[in-house]
Image (cartoon, rainbow, N blue to C red):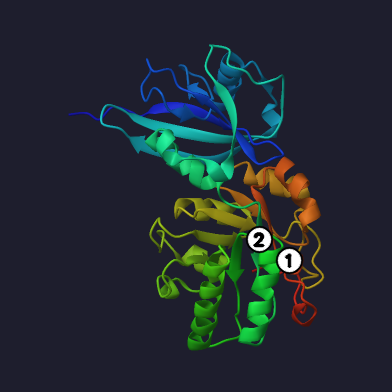
Amino acid sequence: MKTAMPVHVAVGVIVDDRNRVLTSLRSSQLHQGGLWEFPGGKLEANENVIDALQRELAEELGITIDPAACFPLKKVIHHYSDKSVLLDIWQVNAFTGEPHGQEGQPVVWQAIERLDQDRFPAADLAIIQVLKLPRCIAVSGDFSSMEQLRAGIQNLAAKKIQLVQLRKPDTTENEFLSFARHAAELCHGLNMRLQINAHPALAGKIPGVGLHVNSATLLSLDRRPTGLEELFSASCHNLDELHHAESVEVDFAFLSPVKPSASHPLAIPMGWSGFRSAAAQVSIPVYALGGVAETDLTTARRQGAHGIAAISAFWDIQELCKTGDNLLI
């Protein structure tokens, strides 16, 4: 029996400056009725995604979105018992008008950290997972002892950093795992998430810890090396690498260098225009890396970044400040 094509649905993710996302309540008469959803709707015949998003958000919410400020975030295929859907999820960074339920449906801004996946259609779980990725990711700078590692992570916790990537290339595998186990214990106690910047062979060595790979390792992969329960990400420096990261199903990618790098003076920065162009051509969350600081977050978001990643912008204990946040990691 021929399998029906999934229903192609354009979805708009609209987040305000209080880290709330716009949601609406589905009519009880509809499929998956009575659940909250992210605004959007199915594409009409011969309609592209942006046109569908413009039409649906105008019809549902009475707002006009700026197509130039919309960026692909993720594509998700989900199979229900009675139908399949392809969610084409876009980040909407600018619109005019006051959102309200044009069809009488309740429209509510919900705090992202409080989103309850049980009150959304099952297909929307992937959207919630993306939304709960932090805006800032700290990558560890230089440290030479457990005490310095502890001080660095505690300092990040004080800055409300939620995700830390442990990078320590100048160690043996056993030394790195020792540092990683200590970091994992610290992060768990501080309610932070941890990734290790390491070879995929180390994935799973420490339960509950995610994996980040450099661009060379990324290009050697033909599939995701970890399960879906832990974060998997990669460093990229151009559009080809971003496409490969997308093909192996990373949860997010770093793209660098955005700005000039003192540590890599020969590396040509892509600038925000180059970042925007590349990030707009993939359906994965992309973080800006390279010469960026927390003060660049608003600019990064406007240019299609999910957030920023940095080393020295966050890892700034005096004895640890021996590396820059613009390393091509």
> Does label 1 or label 2 sit earlier along the sequence?
2
Question: Looking at the rendered structure, which numbered label has been put on residue 161?
Answer: 2
Amino acid type assigned to the residue bearing label 2 in the image:
Ile
Amino acid type assigned to the residue bearing label 1 in the image:
Phe
Q: Is residue 93 left or right of residue 7?
A: right
Residue picked out by circle 1: 314
**Which residue is painted at 64% across and 80% down in the image?**
149
Q: Secondary structure at mark 1?
A: loop
Q: Nearer the viewer, residue 273 or 12?
A: 12
Residue with the most extreme left position: 1
Question: Mark 2, residues whose alpha carbon is within 10 Å: few (<14), some, or many (≥20)?
Answer: many
**Which residue is painted at 76% across and 45% down in the image?**
298
Residue with the most extreme front position: 189
Image location of residue 326, percent across then percent down = 74, 66
**Which residue is painted at 81% across and 62% down in the image?**
260
Q: In the figure, 7 relative to 187: above or below?
A: above
Which image quadrant is residue 35 in? top left
